[in-house]
Amino acid sequence: MSALVSSSSLARDVLTQPDLWELILAYQDGVPCSLQHMFQLYYAKLEKVQYHIHPELNQMQDPLYMRGYLLCRLLQDDHCDVAHTFLDTFSNDDDIKLPSRVSILIRNTIDNAVRARNLSLVKRLHARPAIGICSQLAMDIAAANGDLDIVQFLHQHRTEGCSRLAFKKAKKHKAVLAFLKANRPQDEHRRETRVRGEYDPGAGAIGCIVQ
């Protein structure tokens, strides 16, 4: 048993060496070209900041976390088509781990799908709880954008709700405001999640959460 564990550990160490990692991503069978390109793009950004010794980013030495990080960044940067390709390619959630040490503005995948105004991505992520992370911000964003279909989906299928900010921002979207008043009166005076910017070397300006 110990020999098997040692062998597995050795193989994992080899596969997560930075020089080999880029090579594997470039030539891995079954990964579409568009996804390979994005792997290389975000991997190169991580390399520039020496991610393997960075306390918030060194998780990405593990291929599972690297995949999760790529999904998060695709959604954050509004690469919706490639995000769909990612979900098609990695259909088993055991092959993905969302990084735990990055800002929730990166990690909250459903929030960013809402920000991208992409209901189909919201639905796909909701159907995969291990990688579909959501907060109160999602409905607040959807209300501010006037995306009634997304607000309705979040209301019907999620439990995070919204805040008073959703009501304030929805004033210019009459159908959204009417829906919120009829269906989420309990949230009309709920405090919003305030976000202030921080700097993350792997992603540029991000944020932290202050309730």
Image: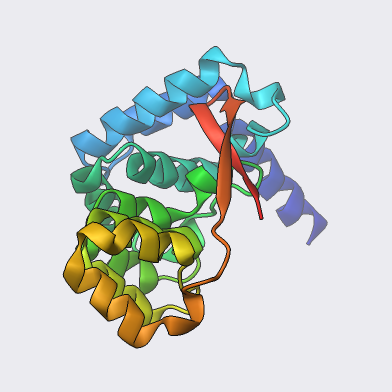
Residue occupying the point 54% across, 52% down:
98
In this picture, residue 81 sits left or right of residue 76:
left
Quarter of the picture containing the C terminus is: bottom right
Residue occupying the point 20% across, 34% down:
33
Q: Where does the image place residue 80, in percent across and percent down from the top left? A: 23, 47
Q: Where does the image place residue 15, in percent across and percent down from the top left? A: 55, 35
Q: Is residue 91 above or below residue 80?
A: below
Which color scheme did the rendering employ for the protein?
A: rainbow
Quarter of the picture containing the N terminus is: bottom right
Q: Which of 202 and 173 is in front in this view?
A: 173
Q: Which residue lies furthest to the top in this view?
A: 48
In this picture, residue 36 sits left or right of residue 199:
left
Q: In this view, does 112 lie above or below 207?
A: below
Quadrant in which residue 165 is drawn: bottom left
Residue occupying the point 64% across, 49% down:
100
Q: Which of 111 and 15 is in front in this view?
A: 111
Q: How many marks?
A: 0
Quadrant in which residue 117 is drawn: bottom left
